[in-house]
Amino acid sequence: MTNSNQFHDDEDGYVPDADDEGNTLNEALKNKCKVSIKKEKQEPIEIFRHSFTQHLNSSASRRISHQTSVINRRLDSLARLLEQDMTCAAVTYDPQERRILIATNTIHANSKATNESIKKIERVMQLLCNHQANMEEIIDSLAEILKDNLFQEERFLIHKLQLNSQQLKEQLILLFRDLFSSGQKTKQWRSHVNSGEFEEVIDGELFKKAVPRISKIARDFIKLRKSLIELNGCKTPVDKSLLNAIDEKEYQILRQGYKDAHAETRIIDESSANPSLKQTYVGISKLCCAHCGLAVNVARVQVRGQHGRGFNWIIPRSFFSDDNLLQAFMGQEAYAAYQEIPLQSQQEAIKHIQSKAGSPNDKKDRRMLPDSSDSDYEFGINDSDNELSDNLDELNFTEVWFLREIKWSYPNEFKQLQALEISRTEIIVLFRQSKDKFVALASESAFNLLKQTDESDLFERLSDIYDEDTQLFWDLITDEYDLIDEHGLDEAYDTYKQMLSRFGRYNSDSEDNDLCSMAAAKLKEQHGWDYDYNSDDSANPWGYDSSSSQSYQSDNQSELSSISNTSSDTDEEDLYHQFQELKF
């Protein structure tokens, strides 16, 4: 007799024979009934474990990295700088209190004010707002930040190399100094830095681990400090207020929650009690783990994304005071099972939620940092910057940043000011005060005037004249009629000033916009004066046009009579002196 449940091998496993299709259907129905009966016999705790794990896997097991705005990316940068050896850091902005809220995995309700982690956060915030810190101080601080981070992330490698804290920091300082002195974009430096240059002092394996981290932390610092420098250029008042809070060290370190709570959950608990934080953006040093990724979605908090891996975790306290949040977090089926669990056994369900064992643990993609969509900037000092190359320890970040911007955008003007021995500090102050004024004082006309004189304070005088009257400044430095050569700067200044005062301003869009031409036309109209561009007498190009005077006299006899009565024997020399007295 042939068995009705014969099977044959297939590439995909065991499958029933084709001629036994009816019996197979019966078997499938029997198996389904068995599963249903078995499920009914399951304890609620087992149903809860199975259902929650499925819910977590379907909701948060995939790596996601979102695009976001510039100001949100600056919060991410701040979080990465603050993380150090604290596993994860999260930051957000409270618009009502106008302060930055900071949370980490290690600072909790029982942390003392003298906690070393708190001190490290205070040092980073102080660094960011200290615009007078020179580059060596900045490099030392960044090396300290990365040293702590490497001891956390690469502790086995550092133990293998038998490096102590100071030795590791010294090696990182060498790499940071090389980056900031290269004048390259951080990504470009990362691609081209040669391990051979450091092989005698830095282990090759450590070099590979450190270089991308140095590149990242330098970019975070540069971009954040650049945003603080350009505070007035913020697109919205909220952006400006946020950056201003960083610049003025207006921040609060959150200590909500238990010792093992993740930084994001501390922010979630804070947002539940603070209406101004609803749907806020939270900057994170790493992408969220699976549990945090699910929790921020439930709490409607915005983050950069999630890496999808699971770790031991503490559920936000605020979820237990809101059944809707707790149900959304657990999933409908798991929440129903949770309600059936005896009260004294519900703690076992919570332990499962908070356990790494009940979470996805796919290690195919271990990347915990967001995908970088940020632009990159050149920074630092390169070999061609001879005027800067020996002064890295004397420069502060702001000076370096503005000097590089000046050299990129105004190379000729920068060289001319350098040739006049204008100090680096004066150049930066001038540029920050007004780009238009910088261009004017660094123009070819100003350069030629300054180059020809030995007056030590002439640059400052021209700066004051520009502030007094921009048009007077340009008339003076172009000096079309060589008044400075003939009569000196003071006399030329008085003459051009009175010309402007007597004849008023002219429209720069007009075809006849030459001030002296207007003066000449006015003189000819009133007194018969005419300006001879071809005069051989360079000291007296102004001549008396008798025909014009006669024509004018016929129409305006009385006015000319008053002039002639002043001196009956007036000649051209007397008339020239009369013009000089007018102080045009």
Image (cartoon, helix red, strand yellow):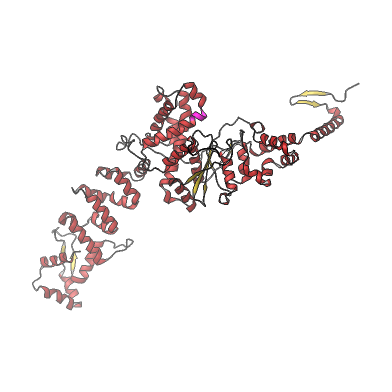
Residue sitting farthest toward the right: 1
User: Quick check: 214 left or right of 546?
Assistant: right
Hey, which quadrant is residue 511 in on the image? bottom left
Residue sitting farthest toward the left: 569
Look at the image and tell me whether residue 376 can be seen: no
In-front residue for pair 266/366: 266
Residue drawn at the location 42% of the way across and 41% of the way down: 126
Residue drawn at the location 66% of the way across and 31% of the way down: 357
Question: Is 449 in the magenta?
Answer: no
Hey, which quadrant is residue 289 in on the image? top right
Is the residue 433 above or below the residue 2 in the image?
A: below
User: Quick check: 166 left or right of 519?
Assistant: right
Identify the main secondary structure in magenta. helix
Question: Is 152 in the magenta?
Answer: yes
Is the residue 581 above or below the residue 371 in the image?
A: below
Is the residue 159 above or below the residue 423 in the image?
A: above
Whole-percent x, y for residue 220 in the image: 46, 39
Whole-percent x, y for residue 494 in the image: 20, 60
Whole-percent x, y for residue 503 in the image: 25, 66
Look at the image and tell me whether residue 498 can be seen: yes
Q: Quadrant of the N terminus?
A: top right
Residue drawn at the location 17% of the way across and 72% of the way down: 549
State the count of labels.
0
Is the residue 243 above or below the residue 546 in the image?
A: above
Q: Quadrant of the C terminus?
A: bottom left
User: Quick check: 163 left or right of 489?
Assistant: right
Give the magenta-colored segment's residue range.
150-154
In-front residue for pair 187/41: 41
